[in-house]
């Protein structure tokens, strides 16, 4: 299958990125980040997560973040993660129109992350997804640990396919395949993605690679050759996984845009503007951008 002419970038920095940063940013700063990303041309920006603030204080007041972005309605999709029925109720109260649920391909990771088995987590999501679809919401499904688990090591492709097909069957329109600890390499990433695509269709598959071993861009490129058209990334390479020891940040949006621009693949994203958004949020966090492209562009400004 040939590479797509256009790729949609699913920006996860304000949720998956910030949730693993030690500094808790105020609501106003999170809103400003999302506005900056929208200005850069990103049309899907994960706005937050309705989890307990005791567990993830970085995601507290996600309802206030959504309220502060009401002027973007119809221009930018602002999905939020919901871990359970309580989170879903809170998302509905906040007038979220796009939600995501997540399940692991690793039994050990599922139990340590959400204290439920894989099957228990899927059972909990089924009525949530059904109600969300009935109310006109879009639903995305995340599968974590698709290429490795911090507790079990290698994860069988069949386990990934099983969880992905279960999420698709319950009504998730898009399934994001996440290399949570960033251990994947191109051939393994392509084989796993192809196996899932054979069951649910490549048009429903998104990929989400962490860059622990510097393989994220290579993995994306391998999957683009399958016809993947949606790629997750995080501005400035923010984040990682708080439940995956040693996992470094997500694939940086700046690096992804730079590569896709070089391939002649359209994204609609302005590299200079997304790099500026990365610099701004890193200043607020008191850290430096982890994006190679972001660093190179910053050096030109000095």
Image (cartoon, rainbow, N blue to C red):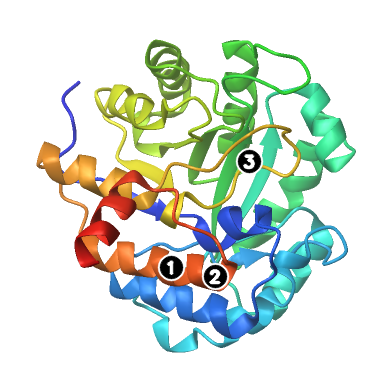
Looking at the image, tell me whether mark 3 or mark 1 is earlier in sequence order: 1
Res. 270 in view: no
Q: CB atoms at circles 2 and 1 under 8 Å apart?
A: yes
Instruction: Nearest to the eye among marks 2 and 1: give it.
Output: 1
Which residue is more in the foreground, 219 or 137? 219
Q: Which mark is residue 77?
A: 1
The vertical placement of 172 against 51, above or below, is above
Which residue is more in the foreground, 129 or 30? 30
| SS label for mark 3 | helix
Q: CB atoms at circles 3 and 1 under 8 Å apart?
A: no
| SS label for mark 1 | loop
Q: What x and y, as percent, mark residue 245?
A: 73, 33
> Mark 2 — residue?
97
In three-dimensional space, the C-alpha distance between marks 3 and 2, rounded to whole angstroms, equals 18 Å
Instruction: Nearest to the eye among marks 3 and 2: give it.
Output: 2
> Mark 3 — residue?
170
The vertical placement of 157 against 171, above or below, is above
């Amino acid at each position: 299958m040939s590479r797509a002419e256009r790729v949609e970038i699913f920006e996860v920095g304000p949720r998956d990125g910030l949730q693993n940063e030690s500094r808790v940013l105020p609501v106003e700063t999170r809103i400003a980040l999302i506005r900056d990303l929208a200005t850069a041309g990103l049309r899907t920006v994960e706005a937050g997560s309705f989890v307990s603030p005791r567990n993830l204080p970085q995601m507290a007041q996600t309802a206030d973040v959504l309220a502060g972005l009401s002027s973007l309605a119809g221009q930018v999709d602002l999905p939020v993660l919901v871990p359970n029925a309580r989170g879903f109720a809170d998302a509905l109260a906040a007038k979220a129109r796009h939600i995501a649920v997540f399940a692991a391909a690793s039994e050990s990771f599922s139990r340590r992350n959400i204290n439920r088995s894989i099957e228990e987590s899927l059972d909990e999501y089924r009525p949530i997804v059904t109600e969300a679809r009935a109310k006109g919401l879009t639903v995305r499904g995340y599968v974590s640990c698709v290429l490795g688990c911090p507790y079990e090591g290698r994860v069988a492709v069949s386990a990934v396919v099983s969880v992905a097909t279960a999420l698709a069957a319950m009504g998730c329109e898009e399934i994001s395949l996440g290399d949570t600890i960033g251990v994947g390499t191109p051939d393994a990433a392509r084989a796993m993605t192809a196996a899932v695509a054979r069951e649910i269709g490549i048009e429903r598959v998104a990929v989400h690679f962490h860059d622990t071993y510097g393989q994220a861009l290579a993995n994306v490129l391998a999957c683009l050759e399958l016809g993947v058209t949606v790629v997750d990334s995080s501005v400035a390479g923010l984040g990682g996984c708080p439940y995956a020891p040693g996992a470094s940040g997500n694939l940086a949006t700046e690096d992804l845009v730079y590569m896709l621009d070089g391939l002649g693949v359209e994204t609609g994203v302005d590299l200079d503007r997304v790099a500026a958004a990365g610099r701004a949020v890193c200043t607020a966090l008191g850290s430096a951008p982890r994006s190679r492209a972001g660093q190179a562009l910053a050096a030109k400004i000095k």
